Image (cartoon, helix red, strand yellow):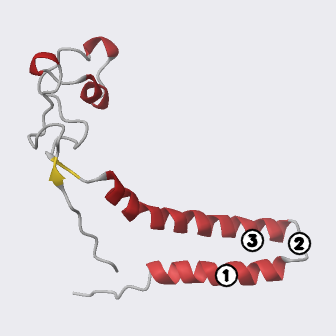
Amino acid sequence: MNQITVNLHDCKHCEGKGTCKNGREESSCLACAKKNDLPFWKQSNQYGLLCGSCGGIGKAEPLTERMNKRIAPMLAIFLVSGLLSLIFWAAISKSPFFSELLAFSSAIIGSVVGYYFSGKIITT
């Protein structure tokens, strides 16, 4: 399988500390208060809340990098589930094009499954 590496950078919101001090008089900001699921009446004048941008670890992963890592697997999941539902619908409705749909879909599903599950099995 592909080795996935994570490039973490210091969080600019909390300056790498993990707690938010961007509100009034170094209290936590409203965005971090909402992220910490505080009720509306307790969101102001809170101190020491976890940073909502990095989750309190002080390091953040860029949004584009997160999207690039997740878009291919999500596309594969939607493609395979869509093709399986198309095959199921064609079988239920007794479509005259069932054999063509099955041949088309099976090649694509086989390629996607082969790509994701072709890794070597490591035994200890």
- Residue 95 has which mark? 2
Amino acid type, callout 2: Ser
> Label 3: few (<14), some or many (≥20) within 10 Å?
many
Drawn side of residue 74 relative to residue 121, left or right: right
Amino acid type, callout 1: Ser
Helix, strand, or loop for circle 3? Answer: helix
Cα gap from disc 1 to disc 2, whole angstroms: 17 Å
Helix, strand, or loop for circle 2? Answer: loop
- Residue 87 has which mark? 3
Q: Quadrant of the N terminus?
A: bottom left
Say if mark 1 contacts mark 2, CB within 8 Å: no
Task: Locate residue 121, reporting x and y percent.
Answer: 33, 87
Cα gap from disc 3 to disc 2, whole angstroms: 10 Å
Vertical side of 35 occupied by 116: above or below: below
User: What residue lies at 82% left-to-right and 82% top-to-bottom?
Assistant: 99
Amino acid type, callout 3: Ile
- Residue 106 has which mark? 1
> Label 2: few (<14), some or many (≥20) within 10 Å?
few
Q: Quadrant of residue 45?
A: top left
User: What residue lies at 62% left-to-right and 80% top-to-bottom?
Assistant: 108
Drawn side of residue 119 relative to residue 115, left or right: left
Q: Quadrant of residue 122?
A: bottom left
N-terminal-most mark, 1 or 2? 2
User: What residue lies at 46% left-to-right and 62% top-to-bottom?
Assistant: 71
